[in-house]
Image (spheres, grey):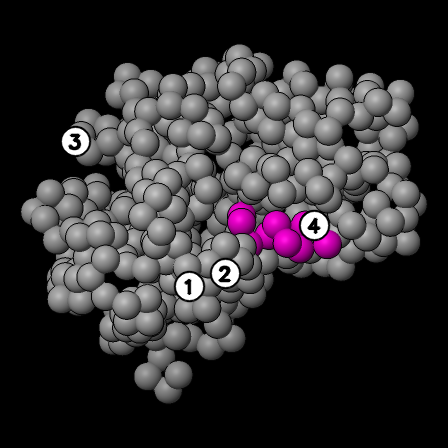
Amino acid sequence: MIRFKLIYPRWPKLKHQTEFHLPPHGPVVFAAALPEEVEVDFVDENLEEIDFEDPVDLVGISMMLTIQIKRGWEIADRYRAMGVKVIFGGIATMLHAEETMAHADAVFLGEAESRMEAVIDDFKNDRLQKTYNHLSEPPPIEIVGPARRDILKRDLYYYKGVQMVDLVHASRGCRFHCYPCAVAYLGGRTFRPRPVETFIEELESIENNRLFLVDNSLAQDTRWEKDLFRAMIPLKKNWCSHPIEDDPQVLDLASRAGAWYVYQAVFDTSDLIRDRIKRYHDHGIAVEGTILLGLDDHTEDSIKRLIDFLLEIELDLAEFTVLTPFPHTKAYEDLQRQNRILSHEWDRYSADQVVYRPKHMSAERLQELYEYAWEAFYKDEPQNIKMFKLLKRVVQREKEQQTFRPRRRDLARQVFGKDPLSRNG
């Protein structure tokens, strides 16, 4: 038996966000690809300390975000100084592979299914390769099975007594190639949906009835999307996701399948966006706007108009970030070529710090407008109240489904320690 410690390095949350922790997706998907002889001990450093004295044969470090990489390197350096081999994987590893190699015995790039038996065999025979690069050759999507959620310490993933969503994916790859996004590099531009029956089997195996479908976008294949939602209806799960196709039939099926809310990018104040948000709401689907500030067509006035627009269209929540030129994105290529990147200090690539020179204002002014956006949107109703309303919505649905029956004010006290709607606060 190989004792394998799989570590998810800690990372700072956005300053204005209510802090909570979701069970990470990458590590549990990776763990499912390991052979049976590997005994996995998973440590989420956001919620628990690493015991460096615990005996271990091999360490894996799974990094999702650029702001995790320096901490990941520190962990690796400490283990390697003790003579323990370290392998890296995950999205941030792929984006920063060359730098990460200096801190690793092996770097795994790409999707792990059907690949880890060979890696573990190399480890056992003391012939680990410096790089296992499978970025250009993803495994058949049909072999992707259930994630290893059994490695999670479930009691850690609660927010003030309320269970967080479980993460799951129904597809990989993305046929879109959005300006700030690295998915085309990481997962390819071919949409690869999992067979619906395979995905449904995984959903049935998840006890939690609250899910986050982490797919880049579900709006990529109408027929598959409809088949997926039809198959999900009997499961009575409640879920959030990235965009759903703006089609009345698709939205109706999504609502019946348990769509709770969606993350929808809002870049402008067009009627297209206004109407799209309204159609989500008409189908009982809440919307959390993901608002990226600092694009080249953004001016100070246009950003302020955008905030006013978000309030007009009654977004349920909004998450503001500033354009961040992550490696292997079109944004990085353009800004690097134009000599507009001000810092390659990766700890600052948190999406709430300006690390480049905007086109129509100073970096300092964009940083001020970022702060203004959070303050202006949540001025009349704080973020925790808006979050409570989303929770109240899903609890009501769960009551109707007879899967969970807390009284509304009991839940409020559970989440906030008091009733947030009480005049006495």
**Which of the two discs, 4 and 3, labels the residue nearer the N terminus?**
4
Marks 4 and 3 sit apart, C-alpha to C-alpha, by 48 Å
Whether the magenta-drawn stretch holds residue 296 is answered as no
Mark 2 vs mark 4, CA separation in Å:
16 Å
- Residue 308 is at least partly visible in this image: no
Magenta stretch bounds: 65-74
Residue occupied by mark 1: 353
| C-alpha gap between disc 4 and disc 1 | 22 Å
* Viewer-side residue, 287 vs 373: 373
| Residue at x 48% of width, y 30% of height | 186
Question: Do the numbered discs 4 and 1 sit on residues whose CB atoms are within 8 Å?
Answer: no
Q: Is residue 150 left or right of residue 41?
A: left
Q: Which residue is mark 3?
A: 248
Whichever of labels 4 and 1 marks the residue nearer the N terminus, that label is: 4
Q: Position of residue 239 (x, y in %)?
A: 41, 41
Q: Which mark is residue 348?
A: 2
Instruction: Tell me if 238 is positioned left or right of 20 in this view.
Output: left
| Amino acid type for the residue under numbered disc 4 | Trp
Q: CA distance from mark 1 to mark 2?
A: 6 Å
Mark closer to the observer (3, 1): 1
Q: Is residue 72 magenta?
A: yes
Residue 307 point in image, percent of width and height: 20, 64
